Amino acid sequence: MVAVTGVGAVVAALLAGGAAGSGGGAAPDGYWMRTDGRFAPPSAFVPSAAVTYDMDLVPAGAWVQVSQHTGAGGATTVELRVRGLRPGHAYGVHVHQKPCGADPAAAGPHYQHRPSKNPADVTAANEVWLDFTADGHGSGGASARHGWGFRRGEASSVVIHDMPGTKGARSACFTVPFGWAAGRT
């Protein structure tokens, strides 16, 4: 088990052998990770792994938590929890390929199980979608489960969009140490 404390605390446990490092880890028997953070603007004095680009929808200080469990067969569950967002607003959330940056585009495109430039492949079955509507207190969450796991180094962040689906602007981004499925390097 690896434990890192502080802002954006990460707890990652390899359920059996394998190695953890930047970009997560893989193990024949599975991988489990949970990380959280507080959103801050890109210009914040103290940088954060959680960056807000739209302070109206994702205020500075709002909280995010992402967890991942990848089982021995490669099936993966990703869970999202948030607090402090705009109450009643519907958000789109997807796993993206690259880490967050000051520019919302830094996170790159959505992670796809079967990489494709065909718009027909932009589906919840081929990507990790975590769309939700914040409750009256600005809290929300979602989970997605797939029979496949991430490829090493190709899933690095969760982007919160200003609307569900695939067309929304990037409101916030959280860099996440996703692990990869054994045999998918």
Image (cartoon, rainbow, N blue to C red):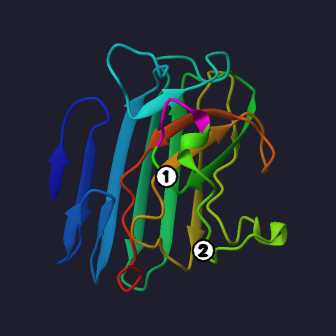
* Dot 2: element: loop
Mark 2 to mark 1: distance in Å?
15 Å
Dividing the image into 4 quarters, which one contains the N terminus? Answer: bottom left
Question: Who's the residue at 61% across and 17% down the image?
Answer: 55
Q: Residues within 10 Å of mark 2 (few under 14, many from 20)?
A: some
The magenta span reads: 100-104
Disc 1 residue type (three-letter)? Lys
Percent across and percent down for residue 8 are: 32, 35
Percent across and percent down for residue 56 are: 67, 16
Dividing the image into 4 quarters, which one contains the C terminus? Answer: bottom left
Question: Who's the residue at 28% across and 84% down the image?
Answer: 28
Residue under label 2: 113
The reply, left or right, for residue 5 in relation to residue 50 is left
Tag of residue 30: none
Residue under label 1: 98
Majority SS type along the magenta span: loop
The reply, left or right, for residue 82 in relation to residue 177 is right
Asked whether the beta carbons under mark 2 and mark 1 sit within 8 Å of each other, the answer is no
* Dot 1: element: loop
Percent across and percent down for residue 9 are: 27, 38
Question: Who's the residue at 50% across and 23% down the image?
Answer: 62
Disc 2 residue type (three-letter)? His
* Quadrant in the rendering for residue 35: top left
Percent across and percent down for residue 121 are: 77, 71
**Residue 21 in the image: above or below residue 112:** above
Q: Residues within 10 Å of mark 1 (few under 14, many from 20)?
A: many
